[in-house]
Every structure is written in C-alpha cells, then in structure tokens.
Amino acid sequence: FPGLADVSISQDIPVEGEITVPVGSHSPDEDYSTLDEPVKDTIMRDLKAVGKKFIHVMYPRKSSALLRDWDLWGPLVLCVSLALMLQGGSADSKDDGGPQFAEVFVIIWFGAVVITLNSKLLGGTISFFQSLCVLGYCVMPLTVAMLVCRLVLLAGVGTVSFIIRLIVVGAMFGWSTLASTAFLADSQPPNRKALVVYPIFLFYFVISWMILTFTPQ
Amino acid sequence: GGGAAGPGPAGADTVSAPAQGGGSAVIDMENMDDTSGSSFEDMGEMHQRMKEEEEEEAEGEAGAGEEEDGEFLGMKGLRGQLGRQVADQMWQVGKRQASRAFSLYANIDILRPYFDVEPVQVRARLLESMIPVKMINFPQKIAGELYGPLMLVFTLVAILLHGMKTSDTIIREGTLMGTAIGTCFGYWLGVSSFMYFLAYLCNAQITMVQMLSLLGYGLFGHCITLFVTYNIHFHSLFYIFWLVVGGLSTLRMVAVLVSRTVGHTQRLILCGTLAALHMLFLLYLHFAYHKVVEGILDTLEGPNMPPFQRVARDIPVVSNAVLNTTSKAIALTL
C-alpha cells in the first residue's frame, strides 16, 4: 500500500495493549485441571472427605461440613456392609439369603427417603440429599454394633451373649439417634423437634432390632 | 480493533521502532481516516471480517462481543462459538421447561398443610382416638392431618416385622418387609378409599383426607394390642385386648361417622362395614403372624406337644373351631 508508506506513529502517543488471545471462561480450564490429575489424587480427595464425615459422626458436633459437601459414598458402603453381615440369619438360609440383603437395603434407603420427606414437609431447611447423607452416615455406629455382635456370636449363643449384644446394640442405637438428631433437628422450628425425632428413632430402632435378632445358622 | 496474527506483532515492533517505513505497515491511529478501514489488517482480511460480522448479526447472536474483544479465530472459530451459543440456549430452555414440569407435578408443598401439627396436638389426638364420643347428633370435627396416621402406619409396620420374625414366618414370594409394608399401607389406603366411596354413596359428610386421618388414628389401638400380644403369647389376653382396645377405637370411629351421616340405613351400612373391617384386620394381624398358628396345626396332627402349646388348649371349643378354620385358611393362602 504505497499511500500508507509515510504514516508514522508519533512518540508521545504510545500504542499499547495486549496482543493475547483472551480466554473465554475459566471453568473449562478448571475441569481440565481435575481431569488431568492422577486418579490417585481424585480418589484420595474423595476418601478424605468420606473419612472426615465419619469422624464427624463419631464426635457429633454442630458443624456444617457434613451438611455442605454431602456425598453418598459413605452411606452406600455402610449399607452394603450391614446388609452383607445381616445375610443368612434365618431358618432357610438358601431361600432367604437374597431377600435378606434386599430387605436391609430397602429399609435403609426407603426409610431415609421417608424421613427426609417428612422433615421437609414439617418445614425443614435442609435439602433432600443433605438429609440422606446425614442419615446414611449415622448408620455407622450400628454397623460397628453388627460387627461386635457377630464376634460375640462366634463365642456362643446364650443369655450372657444376648445381654452383651443388647447393651452394645442399645448404646449404638442411642449414639446413632443422637448423632443424626444433632444435625437434622436443628433445621426445624424449635417446637417441632419431637415430630422429626420420632421417625428417626423408629428408623434406627428397626435397624437395631434387625441386628439384635440376628442369629447365624 | 483486534490484533491480527500477522501484522500484530509487526505493529508492536513498529511501536518501539517507529518510522521504519518501507515494507512494514507503520500506523498512526490518530491520522487514520475512516474510509481507510482498520490499518492493522490488510484489506483482504478486513473484508472477510466484515462479512463474518454480517453473518453474526443475521444470526442475532451475542458472539460479536467476543469477536470484538480481539480474537480472530477465523471462520471455524466463529462457527464453533455460534454452535456453543445455540447449544447453551437450548440447554437453558430445556432446563426451564423441565423445572416447570417438575415443580408442577412433584411439588410436595401440596402435602405441606397436612403436616402442620404440634407434638401436643398429636398426643391429644392419639389419646382421643380411644375415647368414643357421646354426642352423635352433632357432626364431630375430624382434623385433616396426615402426620399422625403416617407415623402410626410405620409403627405398625415395625411391630408387624417383629411379630413375623418371632413367629419365624417364611415368605417365599417376596420379603418380610414387603409383606409388612404392603399389608399396613394396603389396609390404610385401601380401606380408606373404600369407606370414602361408601360414604359418598351414603351421603356422609366426610372428605378423603379426613377419612385417611380417622382410620389412621384408629390404628393406634391396633399398635397397642399387637405390641403387647406379640410379646406375651396368651390367647385369652389377646381376646381381651381385641375386644376392649379394638372395640374402643372402633366405637370412636363409628361414632364420628354416625354423627356425620343422616338416615338409619346409611348409618348402619357405614358403621357395620367399618367395624367389621377394623376388627377383622386386627384378628388377621394377630393370627397370620403368630407362633400359635403353627403350634395349633402341629397339635392337630402330632401326638407330641411341647409345653408352650398347652396354653392354647385353654381356649374354649367354639373359638378353637373358629381358630382352626381361620388358621387353616391363612396357612393355605400363605
């Protein structure tokens, strides 16, 4: 272009700017960053979150960490291990091995859903999955009780073992109920706490009773 | 304007080394004249860019903003951005439609008013359900509440599970839990619907929710009876509980229904049906899932009798016959 040959930039008006390709948005980059990390990191991060929640259940304090980052890994693991341990505890173990597992699974998940719906209908501020998360994690003491019961039953089936199992299961049941109440009842209006606590009590009572009446064949 | 790939860096160079002249395009923005177009690009690229901007405006997308931010990806980049915008819009519309449908049909707020109770009220209603009212000429108030009945049904399920386990009931098709839930919920919902239909036929003043509530609270008597008699296996005790506790809760429900119905025949139909169903349900729950059933069948067939079954022998002959036929029928169905 011959006409532009003599165009020049004067010194006192600097032309400045950035000649870079602007990034559209940052979120695709973030996804890429967690996709690129090694699988071990992802698993360890999730395991740490699950472990932290287990500790929260063991020492129930009012903390929002359990509620904020809900996940259902812990409840799934607990539910499956409890259902596996409760299997084969009836007369015809050949027939009832299957339904036993399905029963425990259905009781836990169906019961948790019902309690969540109930607390929401009563005017609760907690979300559906947060409530499921809390109820599932609070099954942990009962899973521990099941382990202890199985060990005690290895020693023998008698009155003494029954009393030990009763005490252990009773204590764990109380712990479960208290732990879940500490998280869930706070989201209710103060005069309705009893209405929310009763279904939780019934839920853990049914699970505890299934654990207590378990006799291996 | 944007920086093109080629002349851009060249432009930066010319800032630091002005007045090179010759082959490089040295630009003075101030002296630039509108008709000459952007001097950071050569004419060919500028022309293409204008064509693409037209295309963009024709589509009506907001991607032009990004384009003007200084990125020139060429035709492919533009189409990619357009595609992204279109996909984004479709996603938004779809999400809006789905959430609207969801909030319309899966709205649990429809049920919220029926759960608006205080613990004191629930306790009062539980106790009232065992007290028959005397005033049947004046329509009695029924609270349309679903929390109490729902909790009672679940408690009944739990008690039933206990009864089935201790009686070693073996369910071949299905699970214990399924049977318990099916029985209790089936009774509550099915009998309520049936009674509501009968009430509609007999011109009784009662709504569905009230019927559900009434029948649900009537299950309180069942819960008490079964809780006691599944643990203390005395037959005569069960009959006493059946008559007294079951009878009281039936009388209460019947009185409330009578107060809301006009006409003798209609009252008779409604109350007879409700009383029969309520009492028979308790009878069924006790005998279907109780150890005594198997015990009696064994007594009929075998000479050896463990001490426990001797208790069953104390019942009078008439009810024994009833018991036998009932238990045989139930055993056949099970």
Image (cartoon, coloured by chain):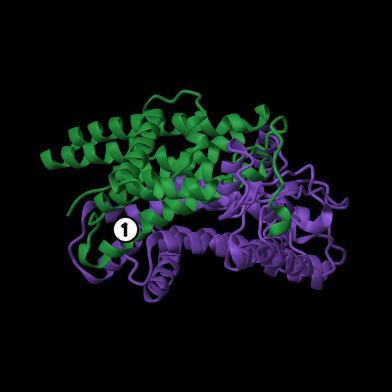
Chain colours: A green, B purple
Q: Quadrant of the C terminus of chain B?
A: bottom left
Where residue B31 sits: x, y (%)?
79, 45
Q: Is residue B221 visible?
A: no
Which chain hosts label 1? A
Q: Is residue B112 left or right of residue A100?
A: right
Q: Is residue B204 left or right of residue B334?
A: right
Where disc 1 sits, the SS reads helix
Where residue A126 sits: x, y (%)?
60, 39
Residue at 27% of width from left, 41% of height from top? A146
Which residue occupies the foreground of this view, B261 or B147? B147
Where residue B13 sits: x, y (%)?
56, 42
Q: Is residue B238 left or right of residue B198?
A: left
Which residue occupies the foreground of this view, B143 or B47? B47
Residue at 45% of width from left, 33% of height from top? A177
Q: How many marks?
A: 1
**Amino acid identity at mark 1:** Phe
Name the residue beneath numbered marker 1.
A101
Q: Callout 1 environment at 10 Å: few (<14), some (14 to 19), or many (20+)?
A: many
Residue at 68% of width from left, 52% of height from top? A5
Q: Is residue A189 visible?
A: yes
Q: Residue furthest left?
A: A155
Up the image or down, B164 lies above or below A149; here it is below
Residue at 74% of width from left, 62% of height from top? B61
Up the image or down, B273 lies above or below B111; here it is below
Up the image or down, B70 lies above or below A148; here it is below
Which residue occupies the foreground of this view, B212 or B107? B107
Determine which quarter of the picture holds residue A98.
Answer: bottom left
Where residue B48 sits: x, y (%)?
68, 68
Which residue occupies the foreground of this view, B291 or B206? B206
